[in-house]
Structure formats: C-alpha cells, structure tokens
Amino acid sequence: MPRASMATQDWTFGGTWPYKPRWFHSTDGRMHYVDEGPRKGRPIVMVHGNPTWGYLYRRFIEAVTEAGYRAIVLDHLGFGRSQKPDNPKLYRIPHHGDRCEALLESLDLQDATILVQDWGGPIGLTWAARHPERVRSLAILNTYAHRPPAKVALPIPLRLFRTPVIGELMVKGLHAFVKIFLFKAGLVYPQRLSEQEKAAYLAPHPTWSSRTPILVFPREIPAGPEGRVSDFVAVVHDQLVAAFYNKPIFIAWPMKDIAFGPEILEDLWLHDFPNADVLRIEDSGHYIQEDAHEKVIPKLLEFLAK
C-alpha cells in the first residue's frame, strides 16, 4: 500500500474499529494487532482468514472485553494494517503459522482460548498445537486442520482464482475475492454489510501489488493428501488431537458455507473431538462473523464461562 494511503486512511471506519494499533516486528515485516480488555483477563485470541483482517472480529472484541476477557486479534502479514511485501513466498501457510506463533509467544499468554476461522484455522492452531500448555480451550468456526482427501472439490470462484492469469486478473485487477466472494457468494445476508463496513474490507488492498497475499491463499489450498501444505497441516492436526482431546472445544458451523461444507464438521472435526460443544447455524454462509454474529457470540460467551 502506498505510504500516502497508509498515512491518510481513517482506520476507525466511522467508529466501527475504535481499537489502538499495536505492532510486532516479524522477520518478514511489521504485523498489526490489537490487545483490548483487562491485562489480567483470560486471553481470547482471534485469527482471521482470507481476504479479511481483524475487523472481522470487531463485535467479538466488544463482547468478550465487556465480559472481562482480554481480546487479542492479529492481522496476518499482507492483511489489514500489517505490511504487504510483494513477495508471494512470504504468504505460504507455514510462514503465516510461524509468524503467528512468534507474535503470540511475544505476549507470553497463559490459559488462553483461541478462536479461528477459514485459513485462521491451520495458521492459529499452529500456535496451539506447538504450545498446548498455554491454551485452555479451542473455539473453532468453519475451518480445517486435516490432511485433505484424495480429491478436493472447490467452488467455482476458488477454482478461477487458482487459474494462472485469470486469477491475477480477477483477484489483483478486479479485487474480486473481496467484491464477489466476501461481499456476495460468502454471505447469506449480504445486504447486512453497510457501505462503511465494505470500505473497511476494501481499504487494506487498494493496489495490484497489495493484493498479492489474497491471491496466494487460494493457491495454497491442497489439491489432495500429498504436498507441502497437506504435510504441514497433518502435523498440526496430529498434535491438536493428542493435546486437546480432553480439553474444552466449541465449534460453530455455518451450514451454507460454499467452501467448508457440513461434512467437514461431521466427518472430520466431530470424529476428532466427539465431545465438542457444537452450534450449527442453518442460515449462515462462509463469513459467519458477519452473517451470524448475534447467534455465535452468546454461545461463545456461555462456553467461555464454563
């Protein structure tokens, strides 16, 4: 993002994001995060996916801090207010996982709950899997942390984004991942997004080069059970099952998600964690934090209070 845009952008978006920016200097670039609520409150870590940023959790931050918890929400490198180097290799999943771990370890968190969605699952759960002694419980929204099956079925938008040249034109040229997937195909109730909220999702990636991180994510989706990303996620999965089988787990799942279908909940997550507290939301699409925050947040608070 050009320096002038970073300097002049009002990052409060009409008061919908009133949080003080904090910074972590990773080996690959500066990362933005917010740390709200009482310092001695139990930490709730929230990790976003693609093409969003911490703004996705704005209502969750307010709710958990009002309940006395500490809310920590990071922006991956390349997203939100974090730096956006035009180097695709930096945005591969293992690198995101390592940077997320480094940021969270710098905060020396204890007794934490980590809330993850979309790519925030394999990225954020990397930290939980490597440091289970720091994590009290998992709160899982629609995501995955499993070795994929023999053949991965993808919705048409994601297949197009993965296609050379077409993907560049759609994602980096037309900003289609945000304008088509986030604002339309990924929601059951797209009309609920205000113009101010849309502006907040558009602002972090105003140029061709700043959209490179968005394009890398769909191209990181494993085509099958073998490969670099599949192997990385499989290690995270095995560590999670070993460390968290007997710990509290909350799962909220949008049943109209075109990317993560109900079978991922039923056949994978509940196979691994059959005692999890589960909330199935029939009328929510992929971006559950927008479509169904009013249903997820009360159940999350109930879970945290146990």
Image (cartoon, helix red, strand yellow):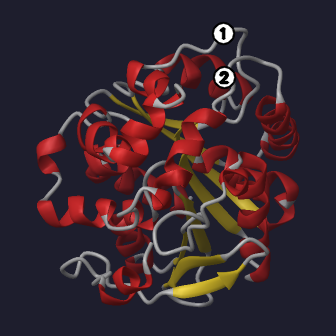
Residue drawn at the location 22% of the way across and 58% of the way down? 198
User: In front here: 256 or 135?
Assistant: 256
Q: In which quarter of the image is the C terminus?
A: bottom right
User: In front here: 54 or 79?
Assistant: 79
User: In front here: 247 or 125?
Assistant: 125
Residue drawn at the location 71% of the way across and 47% of the way down? 93
Q: Is 100 above or below relative to 231?
A: below
Percent across and percent down for residue 58 are 36, 68
Q: Is residue 163 visible?
A: yes
The disc, 2 or 1, on the residue closer to the chain's N-terminal end is 1
Residue drawn at the location 28% of the way across and 82% of the way down? 12
Q: Is residue 144 visible?
A: no
Percent across and percent down for residue 222 are 69, 26
Is the C-beta separation of discs 2 and 1 under 8 Å? Answer: no
Q: Is residue 18 left or right of residue 57?
A: left
Q: Is mark 2 on a helix, strand or loop?
A: helix
